[in-house]
């Protein structure tokens, strides 16, 4: 198990260091700025259309150290975890909204000692709750009864599983993770998760295991459904494909492997206005472990807080101004607008990407 | 000229439309239509393209369709099997021409 970039003292200085690479020219040709692409699509300035999803990143602590993690989470990130006081502020904010969906992420969010208390609180408010689960956390001795707790509270589980075989899964998430993930899925299935008619929703998340874009969500979902059932007897509801963001550990991988320029050019060439119009930040508010507000979890990791004069911390929560806020954008946003689009709920544009050598010669064809 | 094959040439493929834009447009349209989802899935078409890329030994195509195959959800087991299929056909094609050799030899021999 590796350590986080922060622990390895491998990260550039906060924010500006992370952004300077993203905003620099790529190779010999000038890079098309994301805001210019938005403007050409009639979407600039990008604005929110409401707060339907209240996404809380409760901390960076995780029992895994995945190679692509945009949070740079890991077992060594013990300091950055949401306190009960900040959770209480979140509850105050949620009460001022119209029962938003509560999307709890991390790190491994279940490792936050306030996780179960908070889930019960928001369920008590009648909110739908989603837990972004890495699956292996279910087997930790310290998390005894976690799967049963999630089922009892009708929590939707969104589980990471980059591929239906061990080699590619372990290459991204660590040795032995695939087998433990399958055990976690079996446990969830045994409680009714993923079973038709149970009402216990189990969705999987596919991330590419390298410097390439995700496949058609529909096609790879069919592959996962067939192979997981055949090989392991596992069932699930839906599979979401998510594009890896060129930030944090995945960006370090891109640079180290010599793929950064090619990957960024691919994202830019694959810009899809339909995906841009449907980006998740337009109906999501992201809250950091310390209560700071962001337009999305990626902006959060780049330390790009909400801007243009709106409230920047949960204690100053203003539902009206935040629901129609202007969104802070950057070159990393191309990660959400490439091809069929990408969000925490999978593709956004419903448009299949192209498959041809020509695509690399003519980006407009995507 | 530093070499015959240059990675940076692949994104310049569109320059083959210079001087003959109408031919390039026809090729482009046909090429795009070929790879649309049809009786075969896009993933299957990419695997065929990957195999053919090896048979015609085109480094540009191998590069492009390795990436495209991964992006269509294929894995290394499937991609390697596809290359073996291309190789078997190529090897078999060479071998079956041995009958030409045998026919010629027979015609020349007493």
Image: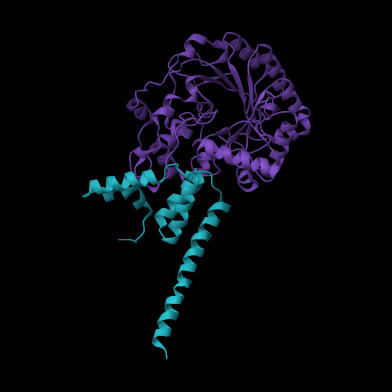
Chain colours: A purple, B cyan
Asked whether the viewer can see residue B9, the reply is yes
Q: Is residue B87 above or below residue A200?
A: below
Residue at image position (36%, 51%) is B10
Quadrant hosting residue A43: top left
Residue A41, x across and y down, in percent = 35, 26
Asked whether the viewer can see residue A207, the reply is no
Residue A19, x across and y down, in percent = 45, 33
Q: Is B65 in front, or is A8?
A: B65
Q: Is residue B75 above or below residue A286?
A: below
Q: Is residue B102 above or below residue A120?
A: below
| Quadrant in the picture for the C terminus of chain A | top left
Q: Is A171 in front, or is A20?
A: A171
Residue at image position (49%, 60%) is B86
Quadrant hosting residue A117: top right
Q: Residue B10 vs residue A94: left or right?
A: left
Residue A242, x across and y down, in percent = 53, 34
Q: Is A338 in front, or is B95?
A: B95
Q: Residue A99 vs residue A350: left or right?
A: right
| Quadrant in the picture for the N terminus of chain A | top right
């Amino acid at each position: 198990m590796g350590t986080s970039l922060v622990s390895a003292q491998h990260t550039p200085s906060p924010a500006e260091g992370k952004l300077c690479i993203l905003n620099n020219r790529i190779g010999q040709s000038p890079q098309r700025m994301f805001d210019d692409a938005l403007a050409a699509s009639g979407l600039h300035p990008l604005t929110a259309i409401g707060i339907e999803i209240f996404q809380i990143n409760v901390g960076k602590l995780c029992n895994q150290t995945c190679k692509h993690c945009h949070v740079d989470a890991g077992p060594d990130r013990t300091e950055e975890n949401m306190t009960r006081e900040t959770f209480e502020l979140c509850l105050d904010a949620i009460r001022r909204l119209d029962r938003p969906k509560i999307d709890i992420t991390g790190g491994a969010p279940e490792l936050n000692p306030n996780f179960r208390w908070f889930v019960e609180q928001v369920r008590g408010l009648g909110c739908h709750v989603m837990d972004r689960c890495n699956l292996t956390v279910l087997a930790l001795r310290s998390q005894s009864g976690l799967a049963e707790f999630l089922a009892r509270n009708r929590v939707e589980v969104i589980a990471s599983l980059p591929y239906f075989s061990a080699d590619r899964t372990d290459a991204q998430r660590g040795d032995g993770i695939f087998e433990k993930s399958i055990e976690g899925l079996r446990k969830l299935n045994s409680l009714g998760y993923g079973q038709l008619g149970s009402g216990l929703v189990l969705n999987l998340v596919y991330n590419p295991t390298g410097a390439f874009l995700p496949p058609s969500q529909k096609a790879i979902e069919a592959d996962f459904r067939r192979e997981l059932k055949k090989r392991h007897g596992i069932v699930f509801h839906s599979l979401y494909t998510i594009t890896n963001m060129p930030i944090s550990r995945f960006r370090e991988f891109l640079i180290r492997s010599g793929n950064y320029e090619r990957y960024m050019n691919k994202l830019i060439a694959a810009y899809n206005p339909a995906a841009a119009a449907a980006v998740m930040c337009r109906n999501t508010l992201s809250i950091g472990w310390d209560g700071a507000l962001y337009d999305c979890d990626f902006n959060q990791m780049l330390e790009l807080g909400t801007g243009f004069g709106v409230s920047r911390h949960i204690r100053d929560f203003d539902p009206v101004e935040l629901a129609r806020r202007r969104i802070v954008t950057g070159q990393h946003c191309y990660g959400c607008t490439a091809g069929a689009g990408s969000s925490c709920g999978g593709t956004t544009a419903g448009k299949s990407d192209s498959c041809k050598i020509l695509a690399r010669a003519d980006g407009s064809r995507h | 000229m530093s070499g015959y094959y240059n990675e940076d040439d692949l994104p310049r493929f569109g320059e083959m439309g210079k001087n003959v834009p109408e031919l390039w447009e026809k090729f482009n349209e046909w090429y795009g239509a070929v790879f649309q989802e049809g009786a075969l899935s896009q993933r299957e078409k990419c695997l065929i393209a990957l195999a053919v890329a090896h048979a015609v030994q085109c480094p540009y195509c191998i590069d492009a369709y390795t990436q495209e195959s991964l992006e269509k959800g294929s894995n290394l087991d499937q991609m390697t099997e596809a290359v073996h299929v291309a190789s078997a056909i190529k090897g078999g094609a060479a071998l079956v021409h041995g009958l030409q050799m045998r026919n010629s030899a027979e015609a020349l021999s007493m």
